Image: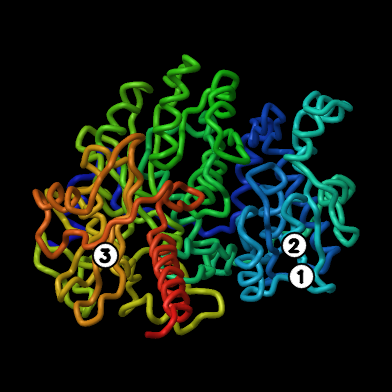
């Protein structure tokens, strides 16, 4: 029996080992759900609501607006927006035309946006008015639509924002800005457009979405996800939680739509289920818990730091979280302690998912049963096969229980990187997707060991940063830690710990090595210690080790340059 079959023995009751991959496009799915639940609320944005019938119509109105701007099947349409109804409309409108959605982080620096645009070459952009100043690099021929976030708010909220008082002006300035003269109003044009009548010309195997990888192991790349890939992962995800009720759930869409986890699970899976999707433009605990009183959430998707902060604020606000029957955590490890606290507070179940953008994104999940293991990556999703292989030779499976690289095969796996055939070839091995993650199978579950590309070579020994971080993080006085490797000549790399201290704490390198030496081999102990005020994190709260490494190396280069300059100025003896 191979690894996948052995692991499937841990499935929760009622979960099938395989799914029928839907043979339809995403716009077709929207039409089908709208036909079943025309008057059910599809989107909720601070109590401004859109029914499924209205959403289907807005999809077609948006398609008319884009078609008039010259969008044709296969064209790329760049979206630079936070979570909001206009974002959803633009996604579906683009796909209705058989065009390709390209997601961007609206808070990304201009340099990053310029590099991404240069790669995909979109000629039409729909952007939040507050992000347009960073798009000044766009060529004159690019058509720009400006989206006003305030227009999605309820009428009373818009009225309050228009008041001639300082607080209203300040709040209005946070939400909107005067767009450049060349930008046309997305909101006005869609309101006036006639619904697009032709059917979606795309096939399920056409690219629906370009979504950028996190860039933690290099420059961000755009993963090509087809309608079939996305619909397969939606079907897999819903099969994993068969107790969800069609047409009755409330999903909170807090994770950004430019992240695959939020796009597929919070958004697409929610629509497929006929759920009401509450959209939040940013993660704000007070905002979320205020909405919880008005529209209780039944399915919440987040990352561990979000759950930690929600628990703290919920205690302060005396919020009732008992409606949250199911919660899914991903993108980074979930501690058993946090999972237990969340389940005790909500009375529901907390499960974990593991994935990557290149797999639409979910690959593994914890079972929805008492057998779940907080901290484990989980079990392969239905119709998903996995292997654990030698990172140097992915044709060879490692022995049972040994650490190796996780490789994946399944209908959710992407078709490649946009415009990067060489990197696409590198990420596949005989048709299997190489995740770059080092994992281990223990007691019927998959556990993370580390990122292959972030593994440190210390004097010929492989050092896994996460294992060193676990040891250092347990030390009194240490609030947070990131472990990276920096070049050390013939020794390979030195292990460096960047730590954030608790208030008033003091930790030396000798103290740290003594503490960590209780659980780590000598070669894995940090050789350098850097104390920082905070660690750089992604939009989802995940520590970006690569950025920590760049900052440390940059600081070292700067110090070396100052020493060189000082010595050159010293009088010669």
Local crowd size for mark 3, using a 10 Å CA cut-off: few (<14), some (14–19), many (≥20): many
Where does the image place residue 415, in percent across and percent down from the top left? Answer: 47, 72
What residue is shown with label 2?
Answer: 125
Q: Nearer the viewer, residue 280 or 38?
A: 280
Q: CA distance from mark 1 to mark 3?
A: 40 Å
Q: Nearer the viewer, residue 194 or 489?
A: 489
- State which quadrant residue 551 falls in: bottom left
Among the two numbered marks 1 and 3 on one chain, the one whose residue lies closer to the N terminus: 1
Among the two numbered marks 1 and 2 on one chain, the one whose residue lies closer to the N terminus: 2
Q: Are marks 1 and 2 in contact (CB under 8 Å)?
A: yes
Where does the image place residue 52, in percent across and percent down from the top left? Answer: 67, 38
In the rendered structure, find residue 138 and report the number of the disc placed on it.
1
Q: Is residue 368 visible?
A: yes
Local crowd size for mark 2, using a 10 Å CA cut-off: few (<14), some (14–19), many (≥20): many
Q: Nearer the viewer, residue 305 or 488?
A: 488
Secondary structure found at label 1 = loop
Secondary structure found at label 3 = strand
């Amino acid at each position: 029996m191979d690894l996948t079959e052995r692991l499937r023995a841990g499935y929760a009751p009622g979960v099938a080992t395989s799914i029928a991959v839907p043979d339809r496009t995403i716009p077709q799915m929207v039409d089908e759900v709208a036909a079943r639940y025309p008057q059910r609320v599809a989107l909720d944005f601070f109590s401004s609501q859109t029914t499924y019938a209205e959403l289907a119509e807005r999809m077609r109105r948006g398609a008319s607006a884009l078609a008039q701007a010259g969008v044709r099947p296969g064209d790329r349409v760049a979206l630079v927006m936070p979570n909001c109804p206009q974002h959803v409309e633009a996604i579906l409108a683009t796909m209705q035309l058989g065009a390709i959605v390209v997601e961007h982080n609206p808070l990304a620096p201009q340099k990053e946006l310029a590099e991404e645009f240069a790669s995909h070459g979109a000629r039409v952009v729909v952007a939040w008015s507050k992000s347009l100043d960073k798009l000044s690099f766009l060529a004159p021929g690019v058509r720009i639509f400006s989206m006003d976030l305030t227009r999605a708010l309820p009428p009373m909220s818009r009225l309050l924002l228009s008041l001639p008082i300082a607080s209203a002006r300040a709040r209005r300035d946070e939400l909107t800005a005067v767009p450049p003269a060349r930008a046309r109003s997305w909101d006005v044009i869609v309101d006036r457009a006639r619904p697009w009548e032709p059917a979606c010309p795309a096939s399920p195997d056409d690219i629906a979405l370009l979504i950028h990888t996190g860039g933690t192991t290099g420059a961000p790349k755009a993963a090509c996800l087809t309608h079939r890939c996305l619909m397969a992962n939606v079907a897999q995800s819903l099969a994993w939680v068969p107790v969800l009720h069609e047409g009755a759930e409330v999903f909170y869409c807090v994770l950004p739509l430019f992240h695959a986890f939020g796009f597929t699970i919070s958004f697409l899976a929610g629509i497929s289920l006929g759920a009401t999707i509450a959209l939040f433009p940013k993660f704000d605990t007070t905002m979320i818990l205020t909405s919880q009183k008005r529209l209780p959430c039944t399915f919440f998707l987040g990352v561990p730091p979000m759950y930690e902060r929600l628990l703290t604020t919920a205690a302060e606000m005396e919020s009732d979280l008992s409606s949250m029957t199911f919660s899914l955590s991903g993108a980074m490890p979930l501690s058993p302690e946090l999972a237990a606290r969340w389940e005790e507070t909500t009375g529901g179940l907390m499960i974990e998912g593991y994935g990557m953008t290149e797999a639409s994104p979910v690959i593994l999940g914890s079972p929805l049963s008492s057998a779940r293991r907080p901290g484990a990556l989980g079990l392969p999703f239905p119709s998903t096969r996995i292997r654990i292989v030698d990172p140097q030779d992915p044709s060879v499976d490692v022995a049972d229980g040994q650490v190796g690289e996780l490789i994946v095969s399944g209908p959710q796996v992407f078709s490649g990187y946009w415009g990067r055939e060489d990197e696409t070839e590198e990420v596949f091995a005989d048709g299997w997707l190489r995740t770059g993650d080092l994992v281990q199978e223990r007691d019927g579950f998959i556990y993370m060991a580390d990122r292959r590309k972030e593994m440190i070579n210390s004097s010929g020994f492989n050092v896994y940063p996460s294992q060193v971080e676990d040891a250092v993080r347990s030390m009194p006085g240490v609030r947070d830690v990131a472990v990276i490797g920096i070049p050390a000549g013939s020794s390979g790399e030195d292990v460096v710990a960047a730590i954030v201290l608790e208030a008033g704490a003091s930790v030396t390198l000798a103290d740290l090595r003594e503490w960590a030496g209780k659980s780590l081999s000598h070669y894995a102990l940090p050789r350098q210690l850097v104390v920082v005020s905070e660690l750089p994190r992604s939009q989802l709260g995940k520590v970006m080790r690569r950025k920590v490494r760049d900052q440390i190396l940059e600081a070292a280069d700067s110090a070396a340059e100052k020493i060189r300059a000082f010595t050159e100025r010293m009088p010669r003896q």
